Image: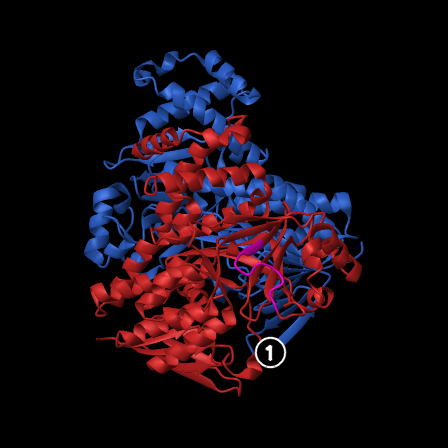
Chain colours: A red, B blue
Amino acid sequence: MKNNDVSIIGAGLIGSLLGIYLQKKGLNVSLYEKRPDLRDKKNATEGRSINMALSDRGWKALDKIGLREKVAPFAIPMYGRRIHDEHGETSFLPYGKENQAIYSISRGKFNHLLVDEAEKEGVKLNFEYFCEEIDISKTTMNFSLPNGEKLEKQSDVIIGADGAYSSLRDAMQKQTRLNYKQEYISHGYKELTIPPTAEGEFAMDPNALHIWPRGMFMLIALPNPDKSFTCTLFLPFDGAKVCFDKINDKSDVESVFRTFFDDAFLLMPNLVQEFFDNPTSSLINVECFPWLMNKSLLIGDACHAMVPFFGQGMNCGFEDCYILDGLIEKYGTTSWELVFEKFQKVRKPDTDAISQMARDNFIEMRDSVSNPKFIIRKRIEAKLHELHPKEWIPLYTMVTFSDMKYSDAYAQGQLQNEVMDKVMSDPLIMQNWHEVNYEDIISQIETAKMV
Amino acid sequence: MKNNDVSIIGAGLIGSLLGIYLQKKGLNVSLYEKRPDLRDKKNATEGRSINMALSDRGWKALDKIGLREKVAPFAIPMYGRRIHDEHGETSFLPYGKENQAIYSISRGKFNHLLVDEAEKEGVKLNFEYFCEEIDISKTTMNFSLPNGEKLEKQSDVIIGADGAYSSLRDAMQKQTRLNYKQEYISHGYKELTIPPTAEGEFAMDPNALHIWPRGMFMLIALPNPDKSFTCTLFLPFDGAKVCFDKINDKSDVESVFRTFFDDAFLLMPNLVQEFFDNPTSSLINVECFPWLMNKSLLIGDACHAMVPFFGQGMNCGFEDCYILDGLIEKYGTTSWELVFEKFQKVRKPDTDAISQMARDNFIEMRDSVSNPKFIIRKRIEAKLHELHPKEWIPLYTMVTFSDMKYSDAYAQGQLQNEVMDKVMSDPLIMQNWHEVNYEDIISQIETAKMV
């Protein structure tokens, strides 16, 4: 292959996976990461977290390079949402069919594994390389090292897998007419822990994603292999009855948890300490265009950071790698610009769609799932899917358990929503939902699709 | 007044006007500008241009501090658009009523005048102060000077009037959850000149804004007191039949001008030289929120840079100053945060509206004004306004010749558009437009407003 020196900025999940992909193609890959090597014990902090939920698109990308078996031992299947009400009562809402699950995996462990694999593959790893400047026309990068040393690196191609605050994107913004949008949502998040029980067991059902939906806010919990749960509390920063601004001491924390998350509270012995030790983080949505300039390309969060409420950020970034790899197979590397143009063209509508769905899903998670009418709606949709597996696929299934284009899933989901809104508008639906005319619903969606 | 040390970053049109306003209030104002003093002959370059079109909102802001008489000698009234077709035929489309005009004024001269006035008022001027960093919580600014010196300045309040690429906004972006959007339009612009005739006269009617609308692109010309015209050519950067990318030599330039702007071409002896000497500039739209953080505020282009097609960028920035001044009168300066919060709240919907109208107006300028049906539409609207001066005010008039809120003008304009779309949908309208039922149109708009 020609033009085969590739620099990837960022050795997070997407950067390391892409490194493996491209090195396997026979390219000569260097990874540059500003943080220290996370495999050293002394660098135990994992950076930003929210446990990852690995789903079909992610597995597919791992499969192509034979990594499924290596990842599987670290991944815990979650077959649905377990919803906790204010009284500690729970109900279970499956994500899909019986064997369909999303998989809880720790960002830190997963990243560790991918960096190891990249190294084995022959990718050159450079940690603590802080990218200070990029000259895109020359494809040169200027790094500063912890000892104060400055290094200039040149390469045929630069790929920015350096996340929501991407330095490659910053460089593009100075060197081209980059359309750019960043939007913070009004909520922040804080990570907390439910440790294993005294007997060393999971304190709750480990095969579910636990949600305490409370309207304007929520708590969620995902299982870890050490039998703890990582919890994430999502609250408005300010301006609401319950918000981070109004929780300032032990009694505030305890009062909020006793009132709204009492069953979880009983399982969180270190709650107060963690609450004040752990940072309150913000959630950003990033969109930009173009994604490329000359022989530089943005990938993953660097061009489409999304809120985490569909659990697709990482899966989407992995799918980016899979698709880019396919385009390199098809077009070769004689013209990287061509490959990058094709990539952007095919991918941008899909990442726009999943970003939007991720925002929409926040309302579903924190509010709708506690609504009995919503649960019936999901049951009707599941039944429709069972009876007509091709004609009716619930949106969650299209996104999570298929690899259809996100933009197609979004469009299809909109149509289905309209039909379901009509079905649910029947004032007696809660009594009569067993008797809905499934054939009629399917014919409505078929008609809608033809328009 | 308390808290009266005010630093303004940027001594452009908005920064200097605001400096005058605040110094007159008894505040202690320092202006910091990265460029050299534009009043020195050696710094003759005016920076970015596009002649300014001063209209009612701008004059109102000048009136409040008694500057109308000083500005008037530099301003040339333009009573309407003079539209040039491909054959050099022209037609005149008035902007408003007989005496209503917008005023062509050179950015450089105007800025010069305002900086002079600021100095007379006692504003402390600091040129060649390049702002490198701002600590918003401490209201400190770090400047570098041409001799390499670094200076830290502290102040009670910082106001960023430093334009579309604002350094105060950059600082906010790092220190708060700033929602931010920048969008470049697909067109760029290049400035050119029509010099005075051999006899030292204007080469065309000086009391009009000249437009050569050509569908996807256009040329415009505004008069200068030295009897030249400043022309601005707006073309797509690339991807179109006529675009900057495809004009690479003398014969390309001449061929485009001969084909599309032949009458102008005959008046432009230095066309080719200017075309290749002058830069091709891009056009950006910027929106952000919030506009303030602690005791720092963005104003003018720094928080709402817009495209120039409604001629409102400067007028809107001047209105910002007028409104901020009114809020200081009302609330005093004991709490700048309060003043800034009120400012942002009242102003954001209006700047969003004018930004949108500016984008919409590009299509009107480059395309619609050459459409006979559009001209009839304007004539009907002018007649409606004549007959019912309060019930029907054309959008252009609301924006340009009134001080009503931009957001109200926008909403009212939308309603009127719907009614006019109906009027114009009559297939015989071009023959029968003299006979339209004006009373009926007015009653339609009255009904629409009530809904």
Q: Is residue A26 above or below residue B335?
A: below
Residue B208 visible here:
no
Q: Which residues are magenta?
A: A201-210
Chain hosting mark 1: B
Label 1 Cα neighbours within 10 Å, binned few <14 / some 14-19 / many ≥20: few
- Which quarter of the image is occupied by the C terminus of chain A? top left
Q: Is residue B209 above or below residue B274?
A: above
Identified by mark 1, the residue type is: Glu
What is the quadrant of the N terminus of chain A in the image?
A: bottom left
Residue B411 higher or lower than B366, as above or below: above
- Would you say residue A173 sits in the magenta stretch? no
**Residue located 45% across and 80% down the image:** A143
Tell me if I can see residue A397 in this picture: yes
Residue A145 drawn at (x, y percent): 50, 84
Q: Nearer the viewer, residue A198 or A337?
A: A198
Figure quadrant of residue B176: bottom right
Nearest the viewer among B366 and B228 is B366
Under circle 1, the secondary element is loop
Residue at figure coordinates x 26%, y 63% from the top left: A326
The x and y percentages for residue A62 are 36, 67
**Image vertical order of residue A444 relative to residue A290, above or below:** above
SS assignment for the magenta stretch, majority: loop
Q: Which residue is mark 1?
A: B149
Q: Which residue is nearer to you in this view: B194 or B28?
A: B28
Q: Is residue B152 left or right of residue A381?
A: right
Q: Position of residue B340 (x, y in %)?
A: 68, 50
Which sits in the foreground, B243 or B416? B416
Q: Position of residue B336 (x, y in %)?
A: 73, 53
